[in-house]
Each structure stands twice: as structure tokens, then as C-alpha cells.
Amino acid sequence: DAGITQSPRHKVTETGTPVTLRCHQTENHRYMYWYRQDPGHGLRLIHYSYGVKDTDKGEVSDGYSVSRSKTEDFLLTLESATSSQTSVYFCAISEPGLNTDTRYFGPGTRLTVL
Amino acid sequence: RKEVEQDPGPFNVPEGATVAFNCTYSNSASQSFFWYRQDCRKEPKLLMSVYSSGNEDGRFTAQLNRASQYISLLIRDSKLSDSATYLCVVPRGNFGNEKLTFGTGTRLTIIP
């Protein structure tokens, strides 16, 4: 158990509204990631963070922003939600070192944009 | 060739049988490979890592063929609890790169 929680776990919202998803970890991991998972696609990286206030874009970052003001929290914001952002969002962590490529995932947030 | 491509499945296999999945990858520089297991409506969880020619963990064996650029996952004496989707994961760059490519997964159902 990597001590990762996500909130909310489920959310239904309307097109055009802002949405913020929260990822919280309790074990002081440096690297944190946001992925989305859609049918017919593998998990795709949205944004990631390699430290407090240090973030970078992933492959599907358009329409999303992130913030990391504390080691334990990584926030994903959909600035103006669209139906194409209906998805399951997973937060993940990893640790530098031998297994830097290993990801430990949170339980996921299921987001529906109407 | 796609970055990562998996047998789409679904594989419906009787309990106790042996089943194998393949995963092909395009990045010849990748040094490490991973199999994740994902249960329905749950998060992916690491099953096995492969850093050299292969890895074995109980009933599970992962093999790497660098020349043909594929990895395989073999499950022996399959159990009902093995029913899940299996994701193949390949780093995009050299060892230590933080960006990974996830396959779309192979769904396995073990039939009693």
C-alpha cells in the first residue's frame, strides 16, 4: 500500500465548469503523476511533478493544469470541463532510484462531464 | 509499429490451464519492462518487472526477447483470481526515464 488517496472518488459535472481533483500521499514520495484511462487507450500521462512547485506536461495536458504546493498533495484542475474529459483519472507515485519506472496508483476518480 | 501493442483478448481459459500473452514494443532503447494487473474498476497494480531476459515469480513468468522486441507473460495453473486485465508497460527512453507507455491491456477470464 503506497498510502495514496484520491478525492472525490466519483464526480458528475457540467460542461464549462471548473473541476479540481486531489491526490494525497502520506509517504513523502517525490514524484507524483496524473493519468487518465479511456477505453481503447492505455493509461496516458497528463502532468507530473518531481517536487514541490516543480511540474511538467505529459502527453495529453491540454485543458488541464496542476499544482503542488506541498509534497503530499498534487492537484489536477480541469479549467473548463468538456465531455471529452469524461474519464477515469489515476494519481500515481514513484521513487527515484532503481525502480524509478515503477508506478503505484491511487484508487482513481471517475469523472463524468455532461 | 505502435509504441506498445498487446494481444487484445479476451482470453477465456479454464481453471488450471496455462495461458500466455504477448506484448510488442517499438523502442529498442528500453531497458526495463513491466506487467501490471488491473481488476475491474480498480487501479493497476505492479505484477512483475523485467530487466534482463526474464523473471519468474511463482506461477508467473515474464520473458523478454530483445531481438524481436516483445515481452510475454505466462501464467501456469491458472486460478479464478487471475481473472483481470493485464497491462504491458514500456519506458519511452533509456533506463530511469519517467515517461512510460501503457498498453491497452489484455483481458483474461478464468472459467471454473
Image (cartoon, helix red, strand yellow):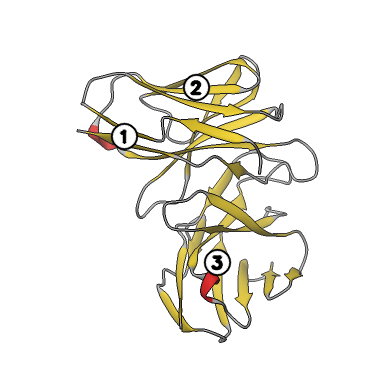
Tag of residue B83: none
The amino acid at mark 1 is Gln
Residue A70 % position (x, y): 63, 15
Count of labels in the image: 3
Q: Position of residue A107 (x, y in %)?
A: 50, 42
- How far is disc 1 from disc 2 in space, using C-alphas? 16 Å
Q: Secondary structure at mark 1?
A: helix
Disc 1: host chain: A
Q: In the rendered image of this protein, does residue B27 appear above or below residue B85? A: above
Picture layout, residue B26 above or below residue A79: below
Q: Is residue B23 visible?
A: yes
Give the residue number, with chain letter if any, for mark 1. Answer: A85
User: Which marked residue is nearer to the observer: mark 1 or mark 2?
Assistant: 2
Q: Quadrant of the C terminus of chain A?
A: top left
In terms of secondary structure, where does tag 2 sit?
strand
Asked if B68 appears above or below A109 in the picture, the reply is below
Pointer 2 residue:
A75
Camera-side residue: A33 or B80? B80
Labels 1 and 2: the sequence-earlier one = 2
Contact (Cβ within 8 Å) of mark 3 with mark 1: no
Residue B27 in sight from this viewpoint: no
What is the three-letter code of the residue carrying label 3?
Answer: Cys
Residue at 75% over, 71% down: B56
Residue A17 position by quadrant = top left
Q: Which residue is mark 3?
A: B23
Q: CA distance from mark 2 to mark 3?
A: 33 Å
